[in-house]
Image: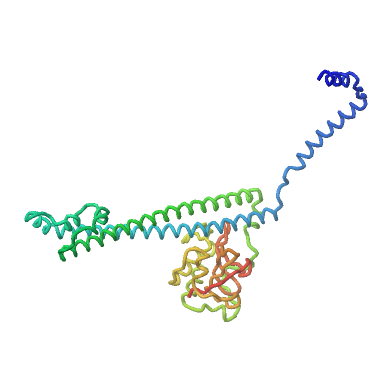
Amino acid sequence: MAKHRKNRLWRRTHRKPIPVALRAAATLTLAGAASATVLDSSALAEPEPSLTEVEQRVDALHGEAEEATEAFNAATEAAQRAERDLDALRDRASRHTAELNEARDAIGSQAGAEYRTGGLPASLHLALSADPEDFLRRADVVDRSDAHQARIVRDIEQRAREIERLRDEAADRAVELTEAREDADDQREVVEDRLAEAEDLLATRTAEERERLLGEDATAVATRAGSGDHHDVAPSARAASAVGFAFAQLGKPYGWGATGPDAFDCSGLTQAAWLAGGVSLPRTSYSQVSAGTRVSRDELAPGDLVFYYSGISHVGIYVGGGQIIHASRPGTPVRLAPVDSMPLTAATRPA
């Protein structure tokens, strides 16, 4: 240890001094490095995105929002269906309970007479139990030697079992309802987040640039299109009504989750259009694609539904002349657009 300490002392006392010029050069080098660091950090600051980059990001955000909108629509529809089922099950359970009580009331006088003349038979005593579960647990051990009493007990047993089944099914529907509502809330958050980010990006641009970004590569005008092709004739009166309704909505705002009459999302518009023609369609684009007969791009006729993107996340209604009417995205009203302005994946004819 002493030897090592001596070596360290020797190195400190015999260390050669750094020349003044070298120290000055080092100082300048360090100062230059610090300046370079400041310059580099400012140079590394993110530049403002170009209009093209903003457009691409806004398009992507609106696409994600539309996918989430359709998922929200599906979850909302599932919640509504579960709620209807739950109400129906509760109503049926209530009716069965009333019928069970009526059956018990019907044997009340007989039970009273039996009791006064020698005691209440076990079957009737059990049938009058206020607890259906207790009844079901003990029903199998009841003496059913009397045929009439046996029929009474079997009837009450059947009603009690049906009430329990309805209660169990209602409990399952209640779980489905809760899950569907939670899913809808999750999708709502996704939609709102994506739209908020898109709005923030658009807010950095001028009014003219925003109008350009929210526009579409469409040269269509808001008039009834027609090229003289036989496919421009609606194949049915219902389809013609749907097309007429779609034209009447031109210029109305996009509203996610909206089904009219003041605003629409994509599937809300097509659903409302065909409802005007007397045809009830499912709520979402990826459900509507299964409603009706598939047609090819070359077979399109007014009223046909045209679906876009790999996830079937967007739908419009074909109106002839190579055009569709659709509710595309926030900030853009219901409008005409070329049928091939987006990647087409499927088309159907509802009626």
Where the N terminus falls, by quadrant? top right
Please report the residue visible at 44 percent of the width from the left and 59 percent of the height from the top.
78
Percent x, y for residue 135?
Answer: 24, 55
Image-based side of 271 in relation to 34, left or right: left
Q: Residue at x 48, y 78 (%)?
A: 236
Q: Is residue 30 above or below residue 261?
A: above
Q: Nearer the viewer, residue 276 or 47?
A: 47
Residue 94 on image: x %, y %: 27, 57
Q: Which percent across, then down, holds residue 283? A: 47, 63
Colouring style:
rainbow
- Front residue of this view, candidates 93 and 61: 93
- Residue 102's place in the image compared with 205, above or below, is below
The relative height of residue 254 versus residue 42 in the rendered view (above or below) is below
Closer-to-camera residue (58/290)? 290
Residue 248, x across and y down, in percent: 50, 67
Q: Is residue 111 left or right of residue 86?
A: left
Horizontal side, residue 285 vs residue 29: left or right: left
Tell me the quarter of the picture where residue 114 sits.
bottom left
Question: Residue 96's quadrant in the figure?
Answer: bottom left
Residue with the most extreme bottom position: 230
Residue located 56% across and 50% down the image:
193
How many numbered circles does the render carry?
0
Q: Residue 111 or 78: which is nearer the viewer? A: 111
Extreme-left residue of the structure: 117
